[in-house]
């Protein structure tokens, strides 16, 4: 097998794996059928009136022939023609009787032996289009053995001629005509459909297939720049679509490569961070030992060193945790909020010397949440508030942290309010953005980001609704989770 053969084979295989649209579902098949149907409908709309017109024309011609014969007969008078000749004349023209009407007087020119009884009267020049259509249908469907009386003026003549005939001849002429027209219509509609099909295939379906192929090709290796679609330069909607696809693919590729860099960087950071934490841990041990020495200089410096290293350790710990964790989906239960807030405050008690903790939640208040995660959310918010208020050196200011809650329908709102100095500009600009929002030394800028992520996992929102000097309010909004009826039903057994 030559190299070329191998290559064509693999590319054919690749094409094979593109999902093929079955023939009946193809756009081109649908279009083909629709075109045939539409053209046929149009042809039928033309077909019926044209058959009706044919019928009238046929009758007019017949009347014309009758008029020509009649004109000759009028000259001679009825008595001049023997019976046999009269029959021959009628036979030749295909009618049963001929009459002329002149100045209000009707005169029978020739007639077969039995004067016929007429079924239908047609004034050829006065037939309206409704009558023409219904008459044509009538003749086609039920005609063949009826007698018609046809009359009217022919050309400029002042005489009106009349004829009586069976409609058998008319009907067979109409049938031939209708068959020809129908065949022609079918031919035209097939031809049109074929042309439309070819045109649409070339103009639309082909390019759409091209777009699709390009998407699939790109999807296989989105980081390969040669796989971005090259617009063909057409100016119609498909051209625009090609351009937009190209833009999209370029954008996607850029984002992908950025993400990859970020991921690499993140990996590097977490490695460095990990080692750093080990180094810091040993430094912490040493500094703890150092703090036990009695030397006054050491005693003055050591506590600061211990605190600094402690902060560094918790920083690296926080970053590592953030890098690693994919927060689990909340295991939601009914949680007594008042109790939870008490626990949170209890853990904060140590740090928050001189701060009032007010648990303003009603004893019966319940919230539908993962209690562990809600605990973390409230801890993060409370700790921030405590840190902000503790940093305020003035002794006279009120330091109070209040947590309250309210419920509207199935939505719980938990308010975390403090009397601290409010969020600094930097924190406000990067609210809830990981690593960016920290405005204090030793802060990671992760607390609010994590809290917000956890609230979102509950289908809720975390918002900063107010932050001025003296009053900062964060609101957690959590909707109760809807009851899954199907699950609830399947776990219930029907009563026997
Ligand atoms: N209640 C608050 N009062 C004042 N500032 C706050 C409050 N909550 C958060 N902040 C500010 O927002 C910043 C970001 O908070 P956070 O995301 O928890 O990160 P970190 O606490 O690690 O700095 C904090 O550094 C602080 O400046
Ligand atoms: Mg924090």
Image (spheres, helix red, strand yellow):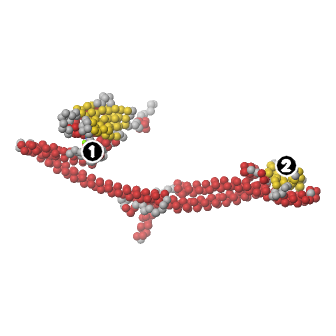
Disc number placed over residue 425 in the picture, else none: 1
Identified at 20% across, 39% down, the residue is 391
Identified at 26% across, 48% down, the residue is 435
Q: How many badges with numbers are in the image?
A: 2
Residue 457 is situated, as x and y percent measured from the top left of the image, at 34, 42
Horizontally, residue 295 falls left or right of residue 479, namely left
> On the image, which quarter does residue 413 sit in?
top left
Other-residue count near label 1 (Cα within 10 Å), few / some / many at <14 / 14–19 / ≥20: few
- Residue 343 shows up from this direction: no
Q: Nearer the viewer, mark 1 or mark 2?
A: 1
Which quadrant does ligand 2 occupy? top left
Other-residue count near label 2 (Cα within 10 Å), few / some / many at <14 / 14–19 / ≥20: few
Residue under label 2: 117
> On the image, which quarter does residue 462 sit in?
top left
Q: Residue furthest right?
A: 79
SS at mark 2 in the image: loop
Where 333 sits versus 237, above or below?
A: above
> On the image, which quarter does residue 43 sit in?
bottom right
Residue 375 is situated, as x and y percent measured from the top left of the image, at 28, 37
Residue 172 is situated, as x and y percent measured from the top left of the image, at 76, 56
Disc 2 within 8 angstroms of ligand 1 (CB): no
Quadrant housing the C terminus: top left
Horizontally, residue 119 falls left or right of residue 429, namely right
Horizontally, residue 128 falls left or right of residue 336, namely right
Horizontally, residue 210 falls left or right of residue 57, namely left
Mark earlier in primary sequence (1, 2): 2
- Residue 280 shows up from this direction: yes
SS at mark 1 in the image: helix
């Amino acid at each position: 097998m030559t190299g070329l053969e191998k290559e064509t084979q693999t590319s054919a295989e690749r094409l094979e794996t593109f999902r093929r649209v079955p023939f009946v579902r193809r756009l081109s098949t649908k279009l083909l059928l629709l075109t045939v149907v539409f053209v046929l409908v149009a042809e039928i709309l033309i077909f019926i009136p044209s058959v009706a017109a044919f019928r009238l024309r046929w009758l007019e011609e017949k009347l014309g022939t009758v008029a020509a014969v009649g004109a000759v007969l009028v000259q001679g008078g009825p008595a001049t023609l023997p019976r046999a000749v009269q029959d021959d004349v009628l036979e030749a023209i295909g009618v049963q009787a001929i009459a002329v009407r002149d100045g209000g007087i009707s005169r029978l020119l020739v007639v077969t032996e039995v004067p016929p009884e007429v079924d239908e009267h047609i004034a050829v020049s006065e037939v309206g289009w409704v009558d023409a259509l219904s008459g044509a249908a009538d003749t086609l469907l039920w005609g063949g053995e009826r007698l018609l009386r046809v009359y009217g003026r022919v050309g400029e003549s002042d005489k009106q001629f009349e004829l009586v005939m069976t409609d058998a001849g008319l009907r067979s002429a109409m049938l031939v005509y209708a068959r020809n027209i129908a065949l022609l219509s079918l031919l035209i509609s097939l031809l049109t459909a074929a042309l439309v099909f070819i045109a649409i295939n070339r103009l639309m379906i082909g390019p759409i297939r091209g777009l699709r192929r390009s998407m699939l090709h790109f999807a296989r290796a989105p980081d390969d720049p040669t796989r971005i679609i090259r617009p063909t330069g057409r100016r119609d909607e498909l051209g625009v679509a090609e351009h937009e696809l190209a833009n999209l693919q370029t954008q996607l590729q850029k984002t992908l490569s950025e993400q990859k860099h970020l991921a690499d960087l993140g990996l590097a950071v977490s490695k460095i961070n990990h080692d750093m934490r080990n180094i810091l841990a040993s430094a912490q041990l040493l500094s703890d030992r150092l703090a036990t020495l009695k030397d006054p200089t050491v005693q003055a410096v050591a506590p600061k060193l211990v605190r600094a290293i402690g902060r560094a350790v918790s920083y690296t710990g926080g970053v590592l945790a953030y890098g690693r964790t994919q927060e689990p989906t909340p295991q939601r239960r009914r949680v007594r909020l008042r109790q939870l807030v008490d626990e949170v405050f209890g853990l904060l008690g140590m740090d928050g010397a001189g701060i009032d903790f007010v648990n303003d939640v009603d004893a019966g208040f319940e919230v539908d949440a993962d209690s562990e995660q809600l605990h973390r959310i409230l801890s993060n918010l409370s700790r921030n508030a405590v840190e902000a208020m503790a940093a305020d050196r003035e002794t006279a200011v009120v330091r109070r942290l209040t947590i309250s809650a309210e419920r509207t329908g199935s939505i719980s709102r938990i308010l975390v309010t403090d009397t601290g100095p409010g969020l600094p500009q930097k924190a406000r600009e990067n609210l809830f953005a990981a690593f960016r929002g920290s405005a204090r030394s030793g802060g990671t800028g992760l607390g609010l980001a994590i809290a917000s992520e956890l609230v979102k996992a509950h289908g809720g929102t975390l918002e900063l609704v107010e932050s001025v000097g003296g009053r900062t309010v964060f609101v957690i909004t959590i909707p109760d989770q809807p009851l899954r009826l199907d699950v609830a039903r399947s776990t219930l057994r029907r009563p026997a």
